[in-house]
Amino acid sequence: MKVAVIGAGTMGSGIAQACALASHDVKLVDLDDAALQRGETTIKNSLERLARKGAIEEEAVGAALDRIQTVSSFDALGDSELVIEAVYEAIDVKREVWSQLGRLTSPEAILATNTSSLSVTEIASFSGRPERFCGLHFFNPVAMMPLVEIVRAMRTDPDVIEAAVAFIEGIGKTGIVCEDKPGFIVNRLLVPYINDAVHALAEGVASAEDIDKAMKLGANMPIGPLALADLVGLDVGLAAGQALLEEFGDPKFRPAPLIKQMVRAGKLGRKSGEGFYRYDEGGSR
């Protein structure tokens, strides 16, 4: 299948890698050449890391890289059968991108957004083809996380959902179909959980290490809520919380003041080298 992935950041690079490993031809698109170079490097390093761990064969590294073409324009996407957008999580940015993609991609193509918290129905309207549109919400890190939330927007055709499920299963992921409700499934439940952990830290209930240890040992969580917030990205978590608060109007979704302060200070978690914990260049604590 010919797949276009829009945005060469962390999520876009991960999605492109997953598609290429499943033998799809991928165009990784970003208007910023530097971002494309970083994306290529990220993918190469990730594939080599998987090979060292024995998760993939050595030969798969080169084969997957050969299937990925980097593109700095939307003009070359007319033959794409699936378009997955993974640009910055802001409605204005997505409006600008999809108003162009809707005109430049094939009428038969399946169109998808990787949004984690915004309305898929609203984003679909920007494309001019809401019947061909769905949400494909991958999780970070894409190479390791098996789930993809397949989001049915208000006007999504049933055959698009059927094709999306088949595609996600074909790249070795587990797809769960859900309706276009704020936060879908995971973030609707996860955001308040992490937010409460941040409140506990700010109130001095315990240290970040002990809050995380308590949830790992007392609730059998594989990772503590504050370490998870660092992995997701505090800016991403803040945007998700604000979107849920706006949609529901329920104060349980109101982001903790400490998260806002940390984002303002540039402490975004693993990707910035510091969040609730400090990390080295490889992202290890």
Image (spheres, grey):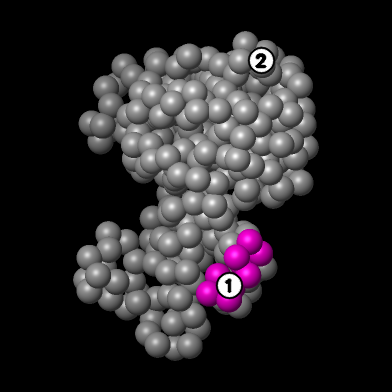
Q: Is residue 126 above or below residue 265?
A: above
Residue 176 can be seen, yes or no: yes
Counting from the top left corner in percent of width and height, residue 251 is at: 58, 76
Magenta stretch: helix, strand or loop mostly: helix
Instruction: Tell me the amino acid under the disc marked 1.
Output: Asp
Q: Residue at x 77, y 31 (%)?
A: 99
Counting from the top left corner in percent of width and height, residue 273 is at: 51, 58
Query: Does the stretch in magenta take in 204?
Result: no
Bin the neighbour count of mark 1 within 10 Å (Cα to Cα): few under 14, some 14-19, many 20 and up. Answer: few
Q: Is residue 184 above or below residue 274?
A: above
Quadrant of res 20? top left
Residue topped by disc 1 = 250
Residue topped by disc 2 = 106
Q: Are marks 2 and 1 in contact (CB under 8 Å)?
A: no
Q: Nearer the viewer, mark 2 or mark 1?
A: 1
What residue range appears in magenta?
Answer: 245-254
Quadrant of res 19? top left
How far apart marks 2 and 1 lie (CA) works out to 40 Å
Counting from the top left corner in percent of width and height, residue 95 is at: 75, 40
Q: For numbered disc 2, what is the local secondary structure?
A: loop
| Left or right of residue 196: residue 257 | right
Quadrant of res 258? bottom right
Q: Residue at x 66, y 16 (%)?
A: 107
Residue 86 can be seen, yes or no: no
